Image: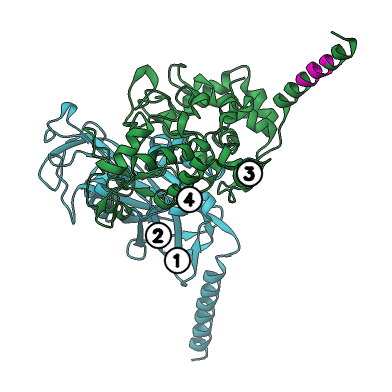
Amino acid sequence: MKHIVSAALLVSAAFSSCKKDDTSLYDNTVKGELSIEFDNVAGSSDLQLNTATYTNGAGESLKISMVKYYVSNFVLTGTDGAVYKVPQDSCYFLIDESDVTTHEPVLKVPEGEYKTVSFMVGIDSLRNTMDISKRTGVLDPTGVASDMYWGWNSGYIFLKIEGTSPAITASGNVFQYHIGGFGGYNSPTPNNLKTITLDLTARGVPKVKKGKDTNIHLFVDVLKAFSGATNMSFATTSMIHSAAPGVPVANNYASMFRHDHTEN
Amino acid sequence: MHRKHWIIAFFFIAGMYACNKEAANYFTGFQKPLDFPEPVYHFATNQVTKEGFELGRKLFYETMLSNDNSTSCGSCHIQTSAFTHHGHSLSHGIADRLGTRNSPPIMNLAWNTSFMWDGGVVDLDLQPIAPITNHVEMDATMADVLNKLRASLAYPALFNKAYGSTAITTSNFLKALSQFMVMCISSHSKYDSVKQHIGSVSFNAEEQRGYTLFQQKCSSCHKEPLFTDYSFRNNGLVPSSIDDQGRYLITQSDDDKYKFKVPSLRNLEFTAPYMHDGRFLTLDAVFDHYSMQVQDMPTLDPLFRQNGFRGIPISSEQRMAMSAFLNTLNDRSFLLDKRFSEQ
């Protein structure tokens, strides 16, 4: 019996020390790297620019030549409920399907485990109206953002998806969906900003620790931009170059992000 | 001629020379005219300096800002026409491609709450991007423009003078242009002299009568002293074949269909043709429009539907007096000010 008690004591001591180790594993005053991979897919296949043929919700076939979108304003909620907002100045990313170096933004976040990630698709209204000196990097309207910016109606294009479809009779069979509109500066305009919140508990909580890489792998089904609440038809709408006609597309693509797995 | 006269003549000529020299180098920074309200431009993030202003002026007249190095801002904003494209109802840009609107004056922009006829641009610093990248205006990419400036002999040194660094950045480029543009203040009309009690200048009887009529019939939109309230209104122009829907293109709200920004009436004499598409070649045509041709539309401004009359009732006799008053808004010194000219 004595042995059993000692053994039990030992085991429980071991457990409690384990537990103790577990919580002291993280130091939330220290930041580690958390990358978020935006893996663009088309339905259940990897997205192939220019070559593969897909079908939209209206039954029209299409090829995709370009997919670009901004993600920004990342917020992480810890398993303990603590909310961490990534500082805005380091929180704007342009995902470009044709440039593999853009697919995996890296955030610096406090060590810990996170149950949800949320982010905005697009550029918030504040940054959209901020002094030009603050618009550097992917936000430079004369640099990286030069083709993601409406000069005639000051504001960023949030998402661009372009391609061809035989359903379009105009020459080249080209469609261009450019979605933007942050709500207007001095009078209200359509607001196509979308905030996406993804649960991470079902498919793997990220465990961030300094010195190790943690990766949240998202699948982004770009075909969802064309279908959902509104099935877009290329025969009817092949060009979108302003905020209002982009509303149904933005509503559609708000549901194209899903968490696939986490690499800890 | 007596010797005394020669001496006087000498000093007179020397004095003129000194004045001229002084005028060319004279720089006081941004100064608000006495009768103007506080400006709205954000000087806190772009203090006007002599070097920045001079760099902005050089850029304003720089043809490298266009794709084929043919067209500068000054090509369509001509100083002697108060920085408009005189004689062109619709302004043409590169390769004579025709735009859809009449180029507005570069004048008193520090008070503008938005830019373009439809207000699509809200910050003066962002305004140049629109014409530089527009296919029918300068048809360039901003990246190309900046690279051309970087590769030039003159500009890195000029940016260094203005900003203490030879690096040519988006922000410094755009802010220099803003510095030049906010300095283009027109405030030396007869109207300003009367309002500021300069000397003994006063309106004559006809101008005074015109002023009273103007205040009754026009000043709710063309608000003094800048002669616009910067609002967007439908003034009953029959849509042209282009069917430019104005402010609607920006807000996509049906309430904004066919609304355009109320333009200033300063320097009216030099800024013909009138309206967003330059359809009226003379002031008389404008009077004809308001008194007889205002078209009814759902978004027509309610001010044009008063007392059972559509438009603004203006008799031909009133028209004479109002024209006399409107001529007091012309500021010839603005057209000739060497500080704003290509050097």
Which residue type does callout 4 highlight? Arg
Taking the image as shown, residue B183 lies to the left or right of residue A196, namely right
Q: Nearer the viewer, residue B270 or B99?
A: B270
Contact between marks 1 and 4 (CB within 8 A): the answer is: no
Q: The chain drawn green is chain what?
A: B
**Alpha-carbon span between mark 1 and mark 2:** 9 Å
Which residue type does callout 2 highlight? Ser
- Residue under the point 63% across and 44% down: B33
B234 w.r.t. B24: above or below: below
Is B11 included in the stretch rendered in magenta?
A: yes
Report which residue position mark 2 lands on. A118
Disc 4, SS: helix
Q: Which residues are magenta?
A: B9-16
Percent of width and height locating residue B215: 45, 51
Contact between marks 3 and 2 (CB within 8 A): the answer is: no
Q: Mark 4 — on which chain does it sit?
A: A
What is the chief secondary structure element of the magenta stretch? helix
**Alpha-carbon span between mark 4 and mark 2:** 18 Å
* Residues at discs 3 and 4 both on one chain: no
Toward the bottom, the furthest residue is: A1
Is B75 included in the stretch rendered in magenta?
A: no
Percent of width and height locating residue A195: 36, 58
**Alpha-carbon span between mark 3 and mark 2:** 50 Å
Report which residue position mark 1 lands on. A77
